[in-house]
Amino acid sequence: MKLQLYNSYSREKEQFKPIVEGQVGMYTCGPTVYDFSHIGNFRTFMFEDLLKRWLMHVGYDVKHIMNITDIDDKTIKRSRDEGVDLKTLTDLYTKYFINDLEWLKILPADNYPRATGSIDRMIDMIKVLIEKGHAYCEKDGSVYFKVNTFSRYGKLTNLKLNNQKSTKRINVDEYNKDSPHDFALWKGWKKEDGEAVWDAPWGKGRPGWHIECSAMSNEALGKHFDIHCGGVDNIFPHHENELAQSICANDGKFVNYWLHSEFLLVDGGKMSKSLKNFYTINDLKKEGFNPESVRYQLLSGHYRTKISFSLEKKLESEKLIRRLNDFNAMLLSNGANEIEHNQLPESYVEFSKAMNDDLNTPKALAVFFSWMKDQMKTLNTSHITADELGKSWNFMSIFNDIFAFIREDKLELPKNVKKLVNQRRIARGDKDWVLSDDLRNQIFKEGWLIEDTPDGQKVKKL
RNA sequence: GGCGUCGUACCCAAGUGGCUUAAGGGACCGGUUUGCAAAACCGUCAUUCGCCGGUUCGAAUCCGGCCGACGCCUCCA
């Protein structure tokens, strides 16, 4: 089975075919760096990471670009509120963002272009749009995209413009646009914008939100590329507008596959800063999460279904991660990694089929776990051939290349814990079970788990 | 008002016409093992897929109605 991906544009699963054989150009909408990103944001980035890892696994050379939005209403407001200049603020939160990605073991993009680095390209595109009659200038120096000049407008979103209800968020009187649906390509300078200002032929100001992605994807991946991802909330208006302006400016094709991940819910509802029902990576670290169990929580539901994040699921995911790591350790202790082998167990076929079916991770995980159970049984109860071990190791390695659930931290026992473990070894030799149990409790309180095996004590980090 | 998604065991979650008298994970309970634990293993855990009706030889899966949850409709991943 070949890779099938659900394309938001056609609203169906399509077989994936890259523009250039063997290569994939992938653009993913990155964060607005005015604050810490939360776990909901990371769900999307995790999905994109999964997609990229799978594309790489099936043999594609992936070029991945993730933009950093460092100029918009929120960044400007925040820098004004805090009295910090815009660049200092956005540099800081960009750094935090990259650190969080690293902690979550999300593979870095090939490039993280910043919006402020592509202003010239944006101005060029806007110029073209004005020349072609797709955009118009207003007295205040703003430039708007004229939505009714693009007949396909609304196709991605499946919205019929004349059928829309006016919501509180859209106050027609505030704008001097021809139509309320027209969106800003360029925003004329206002006093609140301070020094966030660039010169353009139609007046000074700053870019609108959507034009940055058109400009940056264009620069990095060309006018026509394979995959564009984001969260579902980006479909409208962001991606719809991006698509319209890109196609109109470039007279042609833009993106072949639009992929969107669903929301992450907390307490059954959408995360929002105003409800304070969101977690940052720092919050999760404080709660004692390890990156692998966060990865598991985010990847154990299909990317197009809403999932709930909860602290209660922490135990479930940790248990699973521990079991996986035990299995991995078991393979290692049997020397599985030293066997040269290029075959895979039969279960891999089913695993790969699930992944190729629009990244069906719950199914793929089920296949792997079920296989793992059989393997563990064999390892525990009977002899396993070198041939089987080699195959198992290959599957385990591939699995970890995709999901990264194996903990890498080399855990050094703290001195005091080491001492307690030694004392316990002696107590056990003396069959002093009372002392032994007491020491086990003490070690547990230090955050380490003791398992007694025929080969002696095994110590694991909780 | 328009567009759309979803409702499967105590919890999470696949399956979308016969291969399923419903995967996988977690919790619970019983057993093997253990000095006791832990881990591991074995067993148990939905005659049933929100409700009602229809299509069909056959439906969790298709159609209709109802109930419930959620999202989008101009700057939120």
Image (spheres, helix red, strand yellow):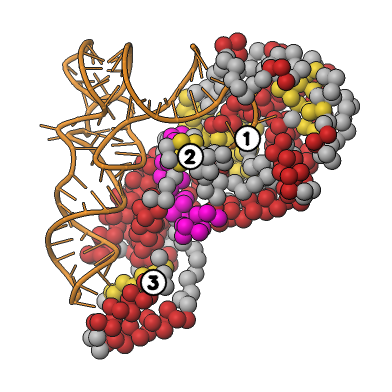
Q: Share a chain, discs 2 and 3? A: yes
The residue marked by circle 2 belongs to what chain?
A
Q: Amino acid at mark 1?
A: Val
Quarter of the image where one finds residue B74: top right
Q: Is residue A246 above or below residue A396?
A: above
Residue under pointer 3: A445
Q: Label 2 to label 1, Cα distance in Å?
A: 34 Å
The residue positioned 27% from the left and 87% from the top of the image is: A429
Quarter of the image where one finds residue A356: top left
Q: Earlier in the sequence, mark 2 or mark 1?
A: 1
Query: Seen in the image, is A303 located left or right of residue B58?
Result: right
The picture places residue A10, in percent across and down from the top left corner, at 52, 22
Q: Label 2 to label 3, Cα distance in Å?
A: 33 Å
SS class, disc 2: strand
Q: Which residues are magenta?
A: A282-308
The picture places residue A427, in percent across and down from the top left corner, at 29, 86
Label 2 crowding class (10 Å Cα cut-off): few <14, some 14-19, many 20+? many
The picture places residue A28, in percent across and down from the top left corner, at 62, 39
Q: Earlier in the sequence, mark 2 or mark 3?
A: 2
Q: Amino acid at mark 3?
A: Lys
Residue under pointer 2: A264
Instruction: Identify the image quadrant of the N terminus of chain A.
Output: top left
> Was residue A279 drawn as part of the magenta stretch in this picture?
no
Kindly tell me whether residue A85 is visible in this rendering: yes
